[in-house]
Image (cartoon, rainbow, N blue to C red):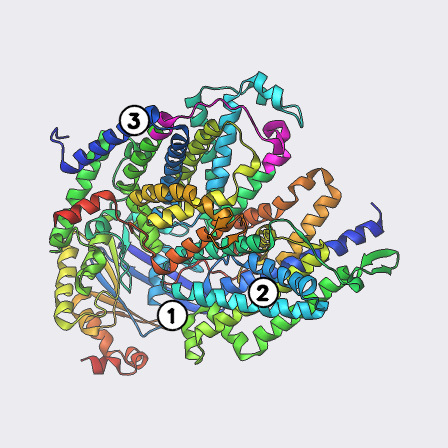
Amino acid sequence: MILELKNVTKKFGGVTAIKDTTFRVNSKEIYGLIGPNGAGKTTMFNIITGNYEATEGDIIFRKEPLNGLKPHAIVRRGIARTFQNIRLFKSMSVMDNVLIGFDFQAKYTYFESILRFPRFFGEEKRIKKRAMEILEYFKIAEFSEQKATDLSYGQQRKVEIARALATNPVMLLLDEPAAGMNPSETEELANLIKSARDDFDLTILLIEHDMKFVNQLCDKVLVLDYGKTIFEGKPADAIRDKEVVAAYLGDFVSHD
Amino acid sequence: MNFLEFMQQMVNGFSLGSMYALIAIGYTMVYGVLRLINFAHGDIMMVGAFLGYFGMAVLDLPFVAAVVLSVVGSALLGMLTDKVAYRPLREAPKISLLITAIGISFFLENIFNVIFGGTSKPFPVPAYMEEIVNIGGLTLPASALMVPAVTLVLLGAILWVLYKTKYGMAIRALAFDVNTVNLMGIDANKIIMIVFGMGSALAAIGGIFWAVNYPSVEPMMGVLIGLKAFAAAVVGGIGSVGGAVIGGFIIGFTEVVVVAFLPEYGGYKDAFAFVLLILVLLFKPTGILGINFDKSRF
Amino acid sequence: MSIIIRKDQWINLAIIASTLWFIWFASSHFDEYTVRILNNIAIFTILAVSYNLINGVTGQFSLEPNGFVAIGAYVTALLLLDGDAKSYQFDIEDPYPWVLALHANFIWALFFAGLFSALLALTLSFPVFRVRGDYLAIVTLGFGFIIRILAINNPEITNGSLGLNDIPEFSNLYWTGGIALLAVWGILNIVNSKFGRAMKAVRDDEDAAIAMGVNTFKIKTFAFCTSAFLEGVGGGLLAALLTSISPDLFTFFFTFQLLIIIVLGGLGSTTGAVIGTVLVIGGAEWMRFLDEPMNFGFFETPALPGMRMVVFSVILIFVMLFAREGIMGKRELKDLFKKAKK
C-alpha cells in the first residue's frame, strides 16, 4: 500500500463535496476514480495534492501523513499530477516545460546561477540530459525546441505527462488523460500509461469518463456519486453494479 | 480631552469614514467582477470633484445641479474607461489590464493638470452646508451630518440593487462565476459596465464631499485618497460591499483618533491605512467580511 | 568546459567589448550634456532590466522602483557624506550621532544601498506573496508614498524636505556603464537558469508551476529582492551623479517612466528593456518641447507643463491595447540570431 485516504470529508461552506471516503492504493496499481460530473473526483485530487485541505480525515502517503503540507512540498515527496484541461507553460519550449519538473532536483543556488559557477553548468547539463531521455521515451524529442502550445493536442498531453514524470514521482495523478482524444489516440495513450508504469516504477491514480479506457487500463476503480463512495472493486464488476448503473443513468450502455 | 471634544472627533471620524466608504465600494465591486485593482478609480473621484467645481464655479449651477452633472459625468467616464480600455483586454494576461489601469490613472491626473493647472482650486461650498449646527453643546458644520446621512442612504440603495433586483443578482453571480450569468441570459459585459457606472457615481459623490470638507480640488487628490480607499476595501474584505463600508469607517476613525490622541504622529497620518493594509494581508487576507477568492479553480 | 567559443559567446564578447570601447570614447570625446544623458541611460538600464525581472519575467505587477531608488539614494548619500559635511547641512534638526558616524567608500555605499533595499523587499514579500491577488502592485505603490512620508518626517536622518546636498560626485560613465553591463549580465544569467525558468512558469501558470514542485513564494521573493537590490544600487549611482537629493525627486513618475520602458521594449525581454531605455530616456529629452510654448508660425500655443506626461500615458495605454508585445515580445537578442539562421 502506498496511498491511503482515511475517512476524508471535504465541505465548501455548507456543501459537502466529499463525504467520509476511505480507500487504499497499492504500489504499482493503476487505480481509477470514476463517477458522474460533480461527483467530487477532481476535488479528491486537489485534496491529495494539497490544493485543498480536507475538512476531516487523513491522507497517508508512504506511511507519512500529508495533511497540512504545501502543494509544492507534496510534489517533492513524490506525487505528480496533470490537469483536466492541459496547462502547459505557454511561453516556453517543450524542453523548458519538462525542465521545470527538474526545478527542485537541480542542485545549485541562486548566487551560483548569477555568477555562473561550475556547478551551474554541471547541473544544467545533467538535467537537460535526463529531460531529453524522458522526451525520447515519449517520442517527442524532435519537438524539444518548439513552443509547447504549438503542438497537436495529443502531443501536448504527452508533454504534460512527461513534465509530471520529470519531478521523479512515485505516484502519478492523471485528471481525465483521454479527454478530447480520438479512439486511436486513446488506445496509444493507454499503452503508454501502462508501459510508463512499468518503466518508471509508478503507481497511477486516474480520473476518467471513458469506461472503455478504464476497463482496459485500471486494476481497480472507486465510483463516487455526489461525494459518496458507491462502489470499489474491479472495473468489470462496476459495470454490473446496480447502484453504479443507476448513478450513471445508463451512461455505460451508450458508451459500449 | 472632555466628552464634547471626544464626540466631536467621533463625528469627524464618521464623516471621513463615509467618504472612504463611498470610494471603497467602487474598488470592491470592480474587483468582485473583474478581479482588477482599478487604479483609475481614485482619479474618477477626482474628476467627480472637479465636475462639481466646474458646474458651480464656471457654469454657475446650483449645488444640486452640479452634483447631478458630476455623478452623471463620472458614471459615463467610468463606463467609457471600461469599454475603451478594459473590455478589449478581457482575454489578455492580467498584467496588461493592470498596466492599462495605471495608464488611465496617470492620464486623468495629467490631463486635468494641463487643463486646470497643478495648484488647488477653492471649492465654492454652498452656505447651508457650512452653517453651524449646535447639538447639545456640540458645534458642527451641517456638512458633517449630511455626509454620513447621505452615505447611509446610498448604501441602502446599493444593497437594495444588489439583493433585490435582477441586475444586482447578476452582479453577485458574476463575482463567482461568469457562466452562471451567461446562463441567466444576461450579457456579462453589460453587467460589468453597470458596475463601473455605479462605482464611479458613488466615487463622484465621495469626491464632492471631500471637496466640500477641505474646500478645494486638485488634480492629484485622487492618488492618496484612492490608495486609502483601496486599503479600506481590503481591510473590510475585498469583494464585499458591506466590508468596504466597514473598512472605510475603520480607516476614517483610525486617522482621526490617532491624530487627535497622538498628535506627535500626525505627520504619519497618511501611512496608517497602509499599515492596516499590510497587517490585514499578513493575518487575515480575506478581510473582515471577505470572500475567499484565493483558491483558483482547477 | 570546452575551450571552443561558440557563436553566441562571440556575439556576447563583441557586445561587451564594443560597450566598453564606447564608454571610453564617450567619456573622452562627448560634451557634458551628452555624457549626462548617457549616464541617465546607463542608470535607467540597470533599473529597467531589474524592474522587468519582477514585472515581465515573473509576471507580478509591481510599482516599486521609486521607493527603492529613493532608499538607495539616501543610503548612499548618507554613507558618502562625512560627519562634517552632514552636521554642516542639517538645518531642521540635529542629526543623530549614528547618522554622523556613517561613512563608507563608494563601492561599499552602493553595496549597502542595494542590501538595504533588498532587505526591505524581503519584509514586504511576506504580506504580499503569501496571498494570491495583485496586492504587490498596491502595496508597492503605497510603499513609495510611505518612503516619502518617512523622509519628510525624520529630519534627524534625512534633513527632511530640504534633502541632502553636496554628495561627492563619484558617478561617471565608467561606474554607471560598468554596473549596467554587470546588471544585464547578472539578470540574463538568472533568466537562463532554473530560477528564470521557474519565474516564467509562475508568470505563465502559477498552479501548474506549483504542481511541478516550484516553491512560488520563494521564486517571487527572489525576483522581487533582486529587483530591489539593483534599484537600490541604481539609486546610489543617481545620488552620486546628481549630488543633491530630496524626497520630491522620487515621485511616481519615476516608476511610470520605467513601466513605459519595459512595456515598450516588450514585457519579459531583457534585450527589450535595454532598447526601451534608450528610446524612452532619449525620447523624454526630445519631448521636452511638448511642455514649452509652441510656435506654429501663424499662432503660438501657451506653455503646457505636464503635456509630456499626458503623451507618455497615452503611449502606454496605446501599446497595451494595440501592441501588447512591445518591440521584442518575450524574445532576446539571441533569438533574433536564431531566426536569421533559418
Magenta segment boundaries in residue numbering? C150-177
Tell me the subunit letter for badge 3.
C
Residue behind mark 2: B241
Looking at the image, can residue A162 be seen? Answer: yes
Instruction: Tell me the residue that label 1 is attached to.
Output: A227
Look at mark 3 in the image and give the residue it sits on.
C25
Rendered location of residue B96, percent (x, y) = 39, 56
Quadrant position of the C terminus of chain A in the picture: bottom left
Residue nearest the observer in this picture, C304 or A209: C304
Vertical placement of residue C252 versus C36, above or below: below
C-alpha span from label 3 to label 1:
74 Å
| C34 inside magenta stretch | no
Mark pair 2, 1: CA separation: 33 Å
Residue B233 rendering spot, x and y as whole percentages: 57, 57
**Residue B112 x %, y %:** 56, 56
**Front of the two marks 3 and 1:** 3
Instruction: Pick the residue in front: B16 or C242.
Output: C242
Residue drawn at point x = 60 percent, y = 28 percent? C157
Q: Quadrant of the N terminus of chain A?
A: bottom left
The chain identifier of the residue carrying mark 2 reads B
Q: In the visual, does C24 lie left or right of A148?
A: right
